[in-house]
Image (cartoon, rainbow, N blue to C red):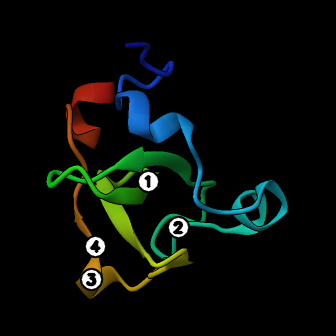
Amino acid sequence: MSHDEHGAGPRAQQSVLSPALRSSLRCPLSGQELIDGVDDAGQPALISPSVGLAYPVRDGVPILLVHEALRAPGPGPEAQD
């Protein structure tokens, strides 16, 4: 199995969103671009590496609500110094 450059695993390579939609979405906290990934439960998510959150994607719909976000797998933002 291959992993993407962010180490999120093989499921992260298959975006559930169209490229045009995904590229226009931004993290509601940081304003930075989100990357395709998976959450701690292995479900599709949009990852905000700068704040360490994984926003769920349910039935192809991104849920960009901070209170719905989970901690992103891997090292947290404090480890990126």
Q: Which mark is residue 68?
A: 3
How packed is label 1: few (under 14 Cα within 10 Å), some, or many (20 or more)?
A: many
Q: Quadrant of the C terminus?
A: top left
Please name the amino acid that badge 3 sits on.
Glu
From the viewer's perspective, is the residue at label 2 or at label 4 nearer?
A: 4
Q: State if disc 4 and disc 1 touch (CB < 8 Å).
A: yes
Outermost residue on the right side: it is 20
Where does residue 3 sit, x and y in percent of width and height?
A: 42, 18
Q: Is residue 65 above or below residue 23?
A: below
How packed is label 4: few (under 14 Cα within 10 Å), some, or many (20 or more)?
A: some
3D distance between C-alphas at marks 4 and 3: 4 Å
Q: State if disc 2 and disc 1 touch (CB < 8 Å).
A: yes
3D distance between C-alphas at marks 1 and 4: 10 Å
Label 1: which secondary element: strand
- Please give left or right for residue 18 compared with residue 55 in the image: right
Label 2: which secondary element: loop
Q: Earlier in the sequence, mark 1 or mark 2?
A: 2
Q: Earlier in the sequence, mark 2 or mark 4?
A: 2
3D distance between C-alphas at marks 2 and 3: 13 Å
What residue appears at the point 44 percent right and 82 percent down from the top-left corner? 63
